[in-house]
Amino acid sequence: MGVAVALVSAFLATAAMAEGGPRLLVDVNSLKVIEHRDAFRKWYPASLTKLMTAYTVFRAIKAGEITLETPVVMSKTAAAEPPSKMYFKPGQALTLDSALKIMLVKSANDVTVAIAEAVGGSKQAFVNRMNAEAARIGMTSTHFVNPHGLPGKGQYTTARDLAVLAVMLKREFPQYAPYFALEGFTTGKKQYPNFNMLIGRFDGADGMKTGFICASGFNQVSSATRNGRSVISVVLGEESLGARADESARMLQKGLTERGGGPTLTGLVPYGETAEVTDISQEICNKHAAKVRSEGRDEAGRQKLLSPFITEMNRPPRFVFAGLISGGATKAGASEQASVGDGGEATAANIPIPVPRPTF
């Protein structure tokens, strides 16, 4: 039985790479699905998981449980998470506002777990809330086992469910839209640009999140707004950073310039559902694939983009501040902070904080 399941999984992975992974393009206002493919195929979300982490946090803020100024303290559990991470030390603290910026721009797993603990009391309690929220908003084929998207058995989603989540974020919490449109952040010592290569480069791009693990390939949920029209694209299983950006740009441009007459997102009839989660590790994380990706970079090491809809940013990225609270720790963590000196990072007081501006 195990061999049969493995063969089916390998076949699905090969087929997915041959034709491209799941896709979905939807109009946020009308909920009309403009384009879709394999929208109900189970897929590893990777760091797209952090969209649900953010949604769960916003729900907690709305309920009055926490505020953007609440300290998020690094625990030993959070600090021990694998990269991508900020390498903050146990006891160091930052505001929830800074933590959200770091999570959504750099995709830092240590900060993500610290957020989960601050909101839920524990990592597992927060994950339980994520799953409850997913069920409540109609993500019918999604399950989370962690708040960051690192590989975990039992963590899966679909392009359709990610589109539902993205729509809910934009509709229910428009006041937090700037978090998803940040071009980057600075701690005062180091600058971190957004992994989303559409922000500041695609006309109207205003979100949302990228993700990668070997099993999922390169994933991206994107959003863009022009002339009052807002669309969301979901691209799963691409072979490189550039490929997911190019495909996302193609889909967003189509959504902003064409009027599709398809079904609504809530009315899309399930099709092609898979019991097993597609795993494309062997196709993505091998020497040949790595060589192809390296050849997709220019002399300066930047990813080559082929889309005519993505333009070069002709100015430096706008960075907002996101770093440790002045002194770097709460009272409980003062002893740990003392060992590394005062103010491990610059404070908000001496860093200009530009307001994120949408690009039209």
Image (cartoon, rainbow, N blue to C red):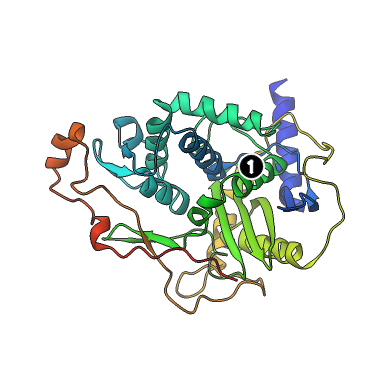
Q: Which quadrant of the rendered structure holds the C terminus?
A: bottom right
Q: Nearer the viewer, residue 19 or 67?
A: 67
Q: Which residue occupies 18% across, 34% down?
A: 331
Residue 265: name its quadrant: top right
What amino acid type should be assigned to the residue bearing mark 1? Leu
Horizontal and vertical percent position of residue 114: 37, 36
As drawn, 305 above or below 130: below
Question: Hey, which residue is sitting farthest bottom in the picture?
Answer: 314
Determine crowd level at label 1: few under 14, some 14-19, many 20+ residues with C-alpha closer than 10 A.
many
Judged left or right of residue 159, residue 95 is left
Q: Nearer the viewer, residue 116 or 68?
A: 68
Q: Secondary structure at mark 1?
A: helix
Q: Nearer the viewer, residue 262 or 49?
A: 262
Asked whether residue 206 is in view, the answer is yes
Asked whether residue 154 is in view, the answer is no
Judged left or right of residue 299, residue 289 is right
Residue at image mark 1: 165
Q: Which residue occupies 65% across, 43% down?
A: 162
Judged left or right of residue 30, residue 96 is left
Horizontal and vertical percent position of residue 204: 61, 67
Q: Which quadrant of the rendered structure holds the N terminus?
A: top right
As drawn, 318 above or below 343: below
Horizontal and vertical percent position of residue 35: 80, 54
